[in-house]
Amino acid sequence: MKAPLLFLILIVSPLVALSQEEPEQEERITSRRSELWNGLYTKYRIGEKLFYYGEYHLRTRDQLVQNMGQIYLRFGLSYIINKNLEITGGIVTPFYWAPPEYADQELPYDKIVNQFRFWQQALFIQSLGKAKLYHQIRTEQRWRRDYYVGSPFELTYRWRYKISSYIPLNSYKFQPGTYFLSLYNEVFIQTGKTIIRNPFEDNRAFVGLGYILNENIQFQVGYAKSWQQRDSGINYNNRDLIRFSVYHNLDFTRKKKPPVDFQPVF
């Protein structure tokens, strides 16, 4: 079996499995909602192997756009070790809107709550014929709090592994005018003193279509299924995510280097 086909099976399998859960497990699902995630991803060369990395997200939820969900800002510096390995580190400042059910609570709560995070990442790149396979390992240190007024910030840790592939559809390599298939599956694990019943945080499986406009701009749209464990450890959020992403890269070095090879949208 060819590697891209095998990878497609690995990505689609979690989606099929979720629809075939035993009745007892289905009863544990307490929330089913749809969300719209819009993201701008930037990667700007500021040195021969050094890049500024940025992500800027606007996310809405409940029938896709009924309620505000998050504004998510990620900043970092990336260093290209070689064509198959790069490392990144930085900070994250997300802002979360309280879910609508908090309006029914008697205790006072904040409608918007922010978090503070550090993050580190290693990205390993493989070539499989005309396809590319990416292994992303990301760690995060998160200071987060509840929505109730006066809740303290608590430190937890998140560990993420994503395997993804980008397969050109109308050309052999990634170049302007190329349409490509985008696939990934990502597993989220969390640890810390306050993480007792829900060490498994999330699994996201994604399938999408991308287009390379030119060497600086790429677009991607697709669907992700998220299976998210709640604090109780027995209840889950079953989320349908529609994602639209724009990828933008520039070269700010005085002596222009060869154009950066196609990079995935994360």
Image (spheres, rainbow, N blue to C red):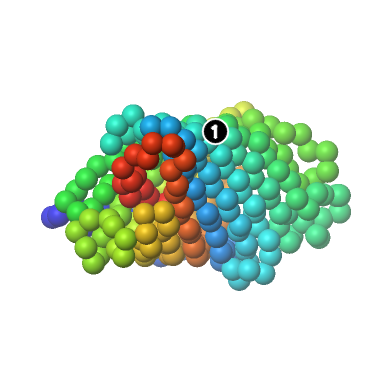
Is residue 169 found left or right of 163 in the rendered image? left
Where's residue 209, x and y in %?
Answer: 37, 65
> Quarter holding the N terminus?
bottom left
Indicate whether 208 appears above or below 134. Answer: below
Question: In terms of secondary structure, where does tag 1 sit?
Answer: strand
Indicate whether 230 appears above or below 65. Answer: above
At x 68%, y 50%, the residue is 96
Label 1 sits on residue: 90
At x 44%, y 49%, the residue is 249
Where's residue 29, x and y in %?
Answer: 55, 59
Place residue 61 in its image quadrant.
Answer: bottom right
Count of marks overlaid on the render: 1
Where's residue 27, x and y in %?
Answer: 53, 61
In the image shown, does 96 or 71 lie closer to the viewer? 71
Is residue 193 found left or right of 25 in the rendered image? right
At x 61%, y 71%, the residue is 63
In the image shown, does 24 or 103 lie closer to the viewer? 103
Tell me which amino acid carries mark 1: Gly
At x 72%, y 34%, the residue is 153
In the image shown, does 204 or 112 lie closer to the viewer? 112
Spot the residue most to the left: 1
Indicate whether 144 appears above or below 40. Answer: above
Residue 117 seen anywhere in this rendered image of the structure: yes
Indicate whether 252 appears above or below 79. Answer: below
Residue 163 seen anywhere in this rendered image of the structure: no
